[in-house]
Amino acid sequence: MVLSRGDGRRPSFPSDIGDRLECWGDKLDSPPLDAMIISDIHLGCENCQARRLCRLLEDMLEKISAGHPPTRRLIINGDVFDSIDFRRLKKTHWKVLSLLRHLSDKIEVVWTCGNHDGPAEIVSHLLGVQVLNEYILESGGRRMLVIHGHIFDDFIDHHPVLTWLGDQIYNVLQRVDRRHYVARLAKAKSKIFLHCLDKVQIRSLAYAAKLGCQAVICGHTHHAAAVAGPIAYFNSGCWTEVPSTYLEIGGGQVRICTAEDAEPVTADPARTARHEVLEEALSTCSSELHYAAVGDHV
């Protein structure tokens, strides 16, 4: 699923993310990579896929201990936390923090701040790393701007109530359907969400151009993407959905990967039969939210 707006048309929005997305080449150079990028973990959120992330981080630590580090640096591109109410953190969420701290002792760990993370001076000590607003990664002679992306999305500032309502509906849909088909369908039907995707992409590309970068890498939208162009756009997706996604970068090449699912979710025929009904209801709900926000000129 490679999104392209070269023809000026809105891209199709499939409900499922493929196993791999690639740009700037078919294969990455041999390890270690220049960077691995994860974003939007949202520790404290009910839908946080902490166990999957733990498996990825543990695998990284094992390879480092064996003398084969998979990457020179790990970049956390915003929204490590869902909120700064640490009482919401579960055992597996604390384990994620512990693994990240262990990794920071062995490789470079960079953390760019997201809109959910809270003040950097409060949360940075939890990982023992400095929190930055943005970071420029050099790989294969290319300058890549890494930034969470929320500064390009003014909808969350102009419509906090609608943003909160949309988040609540989305979280409920994820809990109802463990495969997250319905939640992804809701995003695909949301004109507001699609407008926000456009905003983050267009504005981040313009900002990257000012900084003389050949690519920009965002999070925030929870939607993995790879868009070729004079300046390439990438998004690392999130760890609150199935499948969870992250980026591998080496030699100027970027690849979107999916985390392995140790416990595949089998299809529920009863839920599958209800998807058509839910699709119609979601379409109506999306239209109502869009009309409510019509004052926002996007």
Image (spheres, rainbow, N blue to C red):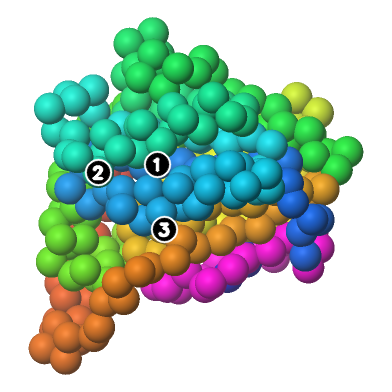
Disc 2 secondary structure class:
helix
Tell me the CA gap for discs 1 and 3.
10 Å
Which residue is the site of mark 3? 244
Tell me the CA gap for discs 2 and 3.
16 Å
- Give the class, few, some or many, for how many residues have Cα within 10 Å of label 3's Cα (few <14, many ≥20): many
Q: Quadrant of residue 137?
A: top right
Q: Residue at x 80, y 39 (%)?
A: 139
Residue type (three-letter) at the residue carrying disc 1: Asp
Instruction: Pick whichever of labels 1 and 3 is earlier in the sequence.
Output: 1
Disc 1 secondary structure class:
loop
Is 93 above or below relative to 250? above
Can the viewer see residue 222?
Answer: no
Question: Which residues make up the magenta segment?
Answer: 4-26
Is 264 above or below relative to 60? below
Which residue is the site of mark 1? 40
Q: Would residue 47 be counted in the magenta stretch?
A: no
Q: Position of residue 252 (x, y in %)?
A: 80, 47
Q: Residue at x 46, y 30 (%)?
A: 102
Residue type (three-letter) at the residue carrying disc 3: Ser
Which residue is the site of mark 2? 92
Q: Quadrant of residue 35?
A: top right
- Give the class, few, some or many, for how many residues have Cα within 10 Å of label 1's Cα (few <14, many ≥20): many
Q: Residue at x 50, y 63 (%)?
A: 258
Which numbered tag is attached to residue 51?
none
Q: Position of residue 146 (x, y in %)?
A: 62, 33
Is 117 above or below relative to 204? above
